[in-house]
Image (cartoon, rainbow, N blue to C red):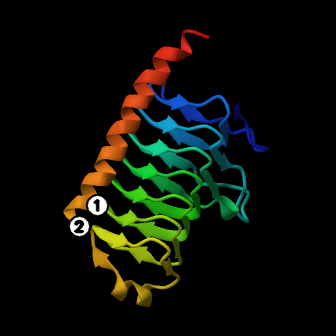
Amino acid sequence: MIRKNPNGDLPVIHESAYVDKTAIVCGKVIIEENVFVGPYAVIRADEVNEEGGMEPIVIGANSNIQDGVVIHSKAGGLVRIGRNTSIAHRSIVHGPCEVGDHVFIGFNSVLFNCTMGDHSVVRHNSVVEGCAIPPGFYVPSTTNIHSSEELQTIRQVTPQAADFSESVARANQELVRGYKKLQNEF
């Protein structure tokens, strides 16, 4: 469902993107080309800051927002998901938050008030909050990071982990093309 927020902002969705009919995209959201938004995802830009304004939620080209993902922002803060990035099933990205290009966020992970550098990986059931993850870092499953000091325990992404992230992005780009073709059949 595509809908306005209380301010009257309507999502801008590139014609090549695929948004599942069960997903909710609300408000000041920009979805770039070849993005896949899966079933029951919620992307909602509707809260304002103290001045009554808000930054957008931007989903970069060739990225995928998988089933049940929630993307929202507190007090109108910016949320930017980079290009060729995968946000896996049931994850939460709550802004303000910036996620770089070629990033993989694993199942059930939570990002809040943080920055994820390009080519970083957050594996399943992890929490990243209140810090900046540098480019090329790997956050293992079930890891909780709540400050920049905790980053010293994080190792760089292995080539195998980076390859996995790229393969997920490629698979979802194929889904965009396939589902776009099917839209004309119903």
Residue extending farthest right: 6
Q: Callout 2 environment at 10 Å: few (<14), some (14 to 19), or many (20+)?
A: few
Image coords of residue 92 (percent x, y):
59, 59
| Residue that numbered label 1 is attached to | 161
What quarter of the picture does the C terminus occupy? top right
Q: Which of 93 and 73 is in front in this view?
A: 93
User: In screen coordinates, is 165 left or right of 5?
Assistant: left
Asked where in the image residue 127 lies, by quadrant, the reply is: bottom right
The answer to the question of whether label 2 and label 1 lie on touching residues, with beta carbons closer than 8 A, is yes
User: In screen coordinates, is 168 left or right of 95?
Assistant: left
| Residue that numbered label 2 is attached to | 158
> Residue placed at 48% from the left, 64% from the top?
124
Image coords of residue 157 (percent x, y):
27, 68
Residue extending farthest bottom: 149
Give me the disc on residue 47. none
Asked where in the image residue 176 lies, by quadrant, the reply is: top left
> Residue placed at 32% from the left, 61% from the top?
118
Distance between the alpha carbons at the discs numbered 2 and 1: 5 Å
User: In screen coordinates, is 126 left or right of 138?
Assistant: right
State whether residue 164 is above or below residue 34. Answer: below
> Residue placed at 57% from the left, 64% from the top?
96
**Label 2 residue SS:** loop
State whether residue 27 is above or below residue 130. Answer: above
Give the amino acid type for the residue marked by disc 2 in the picture: Thr
Give the amino acid type for the residue marked by disc 1 in the picture: Ala
